Structures are given as structure tokens and as C-alpha cells.
Image: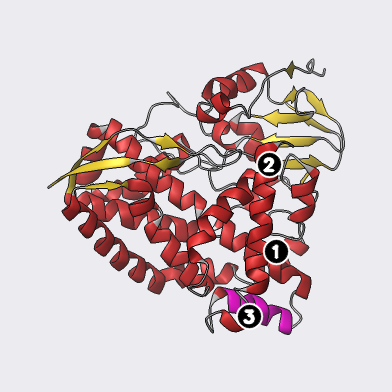
Amino acid sequence: MSVTVISLDIDLFSDGALLDPWPLYRRIRDAGPVVFLSRLGVWAMGRYGPVRAALRDWETYSSAQGIALNPVANGTTEGRLLTSDPPEHDTLRSVLAHRLLPRQLRDVGQTVARRAEELVEGLVERGEFDAVPDLAQALPLGVVLDLIGLPQDGRDEILRWADGAFSASGPEGPRTSEGLALLEEQFQYLITRATRDQLAPGSMGWAIYQAADEGRIDAKSILPLMSAYLTAGLDTTVNAIGNAVYYFAHNPGQWDLVRQNPEIVANAFNEVLRVESPVQFFTRVTTREVDVEGVRLPEGARVMMMYASANRDERRWENPATFDVRRNAAEHIAFGHGVHGCAGQALARIEGHAILQSLAKRVARFEVSAPERRINQLIRGFKSLPTVVQAL
């Protein structure tokens, strides 16, 4: 017997909701396994079990019609990894996926560890810094852009464009329009300035062009692939590092556990990603009528897969709002799940672990003041996080 469909009249994209989404996510989870959001005209999955199962089932929950909440963004991002299904998705992913496997990143890992040590040592010597631009952005920005092989010209705009590209996934409105304009600026940069002749030989960007030359991908896929790796390769790591500083500042006992037990750094990073998932949601479109724990979703339904809500689902996690580095958080879905699991997650982990390991050697306590959150329709993190550290 089907369960009665629950419809909620809530605004997930007001300033207040973007700054503190957790009460609304709880309402969605409590209402049912999947609920209809009347203001948006879409469905929402907020519980861990249904979201994880749906992400595994790409044949029923398709990405090929885009992952955003507006048609312009879905049209603009057509042909990306996130907006394609197998076999096209597998072909596009194969161009660079092998370069992002853990075993292929060993040499990169050594470089990342060295850069993290140098960066953290300098910041701890200063004693006071902004943990977003000075720490969270500084390491991933240099690492990722070097891997892609971008010229120095234009690098100072990359994060602004990435921020806009993510926010463009929201519902129609001023913020979405601003995001789409920034996404167009990124495209123009890739077309006119980060051109083939400006990319470092042997880099990831160079490999994308080579794949087109060899006929492995269509030439029309070059720009979407470049944009995808340029956008998705930064924000998850940047926001996770900023969130880590914030949470350890407010939970000093948890930081003591990390300092005293360096072997739990990887688990601590997972817990940061679980409790504050940088990516809040992506959408999928159903290819058939499907039953979700008794609720019937029609064919053609656009469904918000709410990663951040699922990672705080009381049905899966005990005391989910509590930050606990001893928790086994390995099954979080902050990086997605299934065929669309983040291709760069191994690199993100290398960067996040390196920063935490370097900090654990040098910092006894963090103090943060006047944190300023970014208001972005898809990504959750800080714009500024003034930080004072007490050195060991």
C-alpha cells in the first residue's frame, strides 16, 4: 500500500535557510522518505538510506537532464561528468580518472605534504590568520591548478568562478543569475586565456585535449570537462578544511584526540565531511515510476538528493549533530556515491589529511572569532574565519 504523499511549503534558499539549513532538513527527514517541495515543484530525499540507494541506481535516477534546479544551468552544463550517464559518463571519466587513483597520486601526495608543512609552519609562526584564504584556499588552489596545468594568468579569479558555478544550480532568481554570469566568465577564460597552448605539457588539461585528438572523446566535451575539474576540484576541499578549523576550535577535546592519536586523522576528516557536507544537494530525474519506501515517485520527477541532510540522519547516525572524531564516519556521502562519486576524492583526502597532520604537530588550540559564512545555493562553508592559534 502506498504512503500518502507529503507536501511541504518551505523555502530552502532564503538567507536564513542557507545560513542554518538544519531545522528544515530535519522537517524533510521527519516528513517521509521522499517529500514534495511545493515552492520548487520538485521532490526531496533527506534520509540517508533512500539517498544512498538512489545514488547507486543511476538507471532510475538519471543525471543526463542536469543536476540543477533551473533549466538554464542544466543546459549550460550539458556534457559534464555530473550531467551524463553511462556509457557517456564512463567515457568522459576515463580520460582522467586513472590519474586520480590513490596509487597514481603518491608522488603528488609527497608534494602536497611538503606544501602543507611549509604553509602551516608559516601560519603558526604568525599566530593569527584567516583560516579560509590563508589556509583552506591556499593549498588546494595551488595543487589543483598545477595539476590541471593552468597558466598563472587568471588564477586569482578561479575561486570566484567556481563559487558562481555552484550557486548557479539553485532555483531561478537573482543569485542563480549571478552564478550563471560567473559560469559564463569561466567558460570565456577557458576559451580565450587558458587555451591549449597555455596548458602545461603532460598536465590534466593537456590530457583532455589529447583525448580529443585521439578520438576517445568528442571535441565538444573539452570545455565541459575543463570546467568540471576546475570547479569541482576545489570547493569540497576548501570548505572541508575551513570547517575543520571551526569545529576543532569549538571542540578542543576532539582536537586533543587528533593530536594525541595521529592515526585517526583520516577518520577525523571523514567526520568533518559528514557533519558539515560542503555540497548540500544535487538533483536527479526519474526515468520510471519508482517506489521509495511506500511513496510512489512518477516518471520524470526531479528529485533533490540531499547529501548534507542524509549525513545528519538520525536513522543512520547516533547524535548526528555531535562532532565526534571517534565515530566511524567512513560511509558518509559528502563525496556522493555510486558511478557519480567524486572522481577527485582521493586528492581531496590527501590535501585534507596533510593539513590536519601538519596542524596536529604544531597547534595546541584554535580560537576563531567573527566567522562569516558564504551564502551559496549549493555549497556550505565560510567566507572568512579569523583564527588565532596557540602553538605547541
Closest to the camera, between mark 2 and mark 3, is 2
**Can residue 170 be seen from the camera position used here?**
no
Who is closer to the viewer here, 120 or 361?
120
Q: Amino acid at mark 2?
A: Thr
Residue 39 in percent (x, y) is at: 75, 24
Contact, CB < 8 Å: mark 3 with mark 1? no
Q: Is residue 345 left or right of residue 216?
A: left
Q: CA distance from mark 2 to mark 3?
A: 30 Å
Q: Residue at x 28, y 60 (%)?
A: 119
- Earlier along the polypeptide chain: callout 2 or callout 1? 2
Quadrant of the image containing the N terminus: top right
Which x, y percent locates residue 62? Answer: 78, 47
Mark toward the start of the polypeptide (3 vs 1): 3
Q: Secondary structure at mark 1?
A: helix
Q: Residues within 10 Å of mark 1 (few under 14, many from 20)?
A: many
Q: Nearer the viewer, residue 35 or 189?
A: 189
Q: Is residue 212 magenta?
A: yes
What label sits on residue 196 in the rendered view? 3
Circle 2 sits on which residue? 176
Colouring rule applied to residues: secondary structure
The residue range painted magenta reads: 205-213
**Disc nearer the start of the sequence (2/3):** 2
